[in-house]
Amino acid sequence: MNPFISFMLRTFIAIPTAGFVWLISFFGFDQTLLASTGFSFVGGCLAYFVVKGVMQHRFIKNQGLTRREYKYIEKNLDEAKMKINRLTKALFSVRQVGMLKQNMEIARVARKIYRITKKEPKRFYFAERFYFYHLDSFVELAEKYSFLSSQPTKNVEMSQALKETRRMMEEMRYSLEKDLQQILANDLDMLHLELDVAKHNMNTLKETRYLDESRKLK
């Protein structure tokens, strides 16, 4: 479920619960205004977190994960989010027009992989190469390139290092695209299967119509 919709749903349940607890405390049990407000706050918070726990449990179950696996994946995704922010910052601090398109594509693919995995954590295991190898390498290269390219003067050795880094980043961009394809591999397989079934059904329908027309002509 969309995080914003999930948050709003929990809030819409918690607020009426808090109001109901306040009314029961104040009018039903003759509590003071301050005490009723305190019970109301506790009741609302309790409702909020109970609903959150139930929704999270259902989400984890639907993903086919254990709670331990989900916590492990969630931890790695939190770390990856910070790395992607660092990567994006480093990429867009480079003021070279020739690298703008390449840098935009790198950032786009990295964020795409993260969003897909965040939405469906079970795909994390198909993206381990990205999270444990490629992302770290890209962050390191991008930050070093950003730092060196910002220097006012560059000698031959530095210029050569920057050129080599640009070439390496271009090669690694293809690695990121392969990581994305790996995550989507099952979806592509399912799409091909559905296309084959659709083609088979269309051919069967055409054959049936042909036979029906042939019988009518007879």
Image: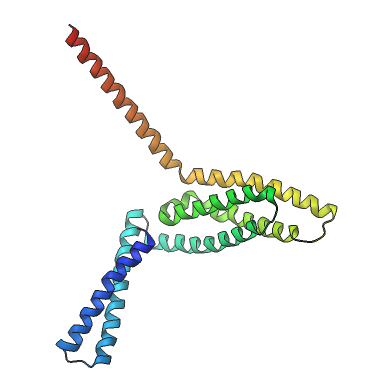
When the figure is inspected, residue 11 is found, relative to residue 194, above or below; the finding is below
Visible in this render: residue 32?
yes
Nearer to the camera, 164 or 58: 164
Q: Residue at x 42, y 42 (%)?
A: 186
Q: Quadrant of residue 150?
A: bottom right
The x, y position of residue 199, in whole percent, is 34, 26
Nearer to the camera, 72 or 94: 94
The x, y position of residue 3, in whole percent, is 38, 62
Q: Residue at x 45, y 44 (%)?
A: 184
The x, y position of residue 160, in whole percent, is 79, 50
Nearer to the camera, 26 or 114: 26
Left or right? Give the position of 66 relative to 175.
left
Left or right? Give the position of 60 relative to 218.
right
Left or right? Give the position of 73 relative to 108.
left
Q: Quadrant of residue 209?
A: top left
Name the image quarter holding the C terminus.
Answer: top left
Left or right? Give the position of 99 relative to 128.
right
